[in-house]
Image (cartoon, helix red, strand yellow):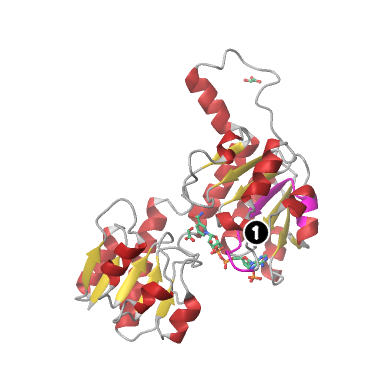
Amino acid sequence: MKVVITREISSKAKELFAQNNIDVEIWPNQLPPKPSELKELCKEADGIISMLSDQINKELIDSCSNLKAISNYAVGYNNIDTEYCKEKSIRVGNTPDVLTEATAELALALTLASTRNLVNAHNDTRKGSWKTWEPMGYLGPALKGKTLGIFGMGRIGFSYARKMKLAFDMNIIYTARNKKVEYEKEINAQKVSLEELSKTSDILSIHSPLTDETRGVFNENIFNNMKTTLHLINTARGEIIDQDALVKCLTDNSISGAALDVTTPEPLPLDHPLYKCKNLTLVPHIGSATNEARNEMAELAAKNIINALIGKEMPARIC
Ligand code: NAP
Ligand code: GLV
Ligand code: GLV
């Protein structure tokens, strides 16, 4: 049996496949395979560990005649046509839980980076353009006692909200499809409408999956509803925000700042108008990038594939 891993990941995965006598082929390059290269790479694979940058669509699936299992090396799986996988009886897994803390920690870091102007302050210092202590410079809002809105109160949204509650005693409001009774009790959170969330939040952080329902939810109408002092944080998926609308409201300061780990596309082309916004903090999709999370993701992704290939349940199965 043969498994393809579409990028180099922690050697934990290779070790587990070796223990189970499964051959592994790893895409050798730093840049991801192009669609045609992905097809060629995967055509004889029984299992694939895919990255979120790989489009696992009908065409790719149809070109893999032996394919029985896919595991995304991510918790989000909007890059995989799961409906088609179900039709073809191909099992699909992902890597939930093991990256929750890492991603919540990054959301916390981005919140402080945006509100306290850290990147501009750092750049000014390094460039020598900071001349003296500035009584009126680099001002931003305090977090203590402010209202934090969570869009998508799931594993990561809750972990981040709890940290913000404990660290800054913030009031937590959230949207989700279902009420989260346990979470509400633990951090005194309140479920509200999207309208209320956008109107009341001082910090608003996005943690939902990308679906047909969430694509472009943060559009001009929603932005118009927000406080001018709001900071928007996105560690979920770029497509949840209408980026043109975001450029407009960062440019005319109708919100104070945004910090993004995710954009459309990734990376953004260098001439993109978002780069002109001084009130934007941008990092390259590093939510799960702790040593611990990436090792555990490799292990879980490998276990998903191994179990599917030996006829056991995947530890983290989507379909
Ligand atoms: P999760 O536990 O499934 O949480 C997702 C939450 O979003 C759930 O509370 C869900 O509510 C809510 N939701 C779904 N549809 C919604 C809608 N239409 N409106 C409002 N809320 C909605 O997932 P997770 O593990 O926290 O991960 C969340 C997402 O983060 C992933 O899908 C992925 O795209 C992204 N992510 C990014 C990074 C990164 O590197 N930046 C790392 C990890 C994850 P219900 O429970 O009521 O359905
Ligand atoms: C990363 O973006 C993930 O979904 O795990
Ligand atoms: C600032 O450095 C202070 O001492 O207040």
Crowd rating for badge 1 (residues with CA inside 10 Å; few <14, some 14–19, many 20+): some
- Place of residue 147 in the rendered image (x, y in percent of width and height, measured from the top left): 75, 49
Q: Is residue 113 above or below residue 198?
A: above
Quadrant containing the N terminus is bottom left
In the image shown, does 242 or 233 lie closer to the viewer?
242
Name the side, left or right, on which 227 lies relative to 161.
right
Q: Is residue 293 above or below residue 114?
A: below
Q: Residue at x 71, y 20 (%)?
A: 136
Specify the segment rendered in magenta.
Answer: 197-212
Q: Residue at x 52, y 27 (%)?
A: 122
Mark 1 sits on what residue? 216
Quadrant hosting residue 94: bottom left
Amino acid type, residue under disc 1 in the picture: Gly
Q: Is residue 285 magenta?
A: no
- Place of residue 276 in the rendered image (x, y in percent of width and height, measured from the top left): 59, 34
- Place of residue 237 in the rendered image (x, y in percent of width and height, measured from the top left): 55, 57
Q: Residue at x 42, y 51 (%)?
A: 289
Quadrant hosting residue 142: top right
* Numbered marks: total: 1
Tell me if I can see residue 318 in this picture.
no
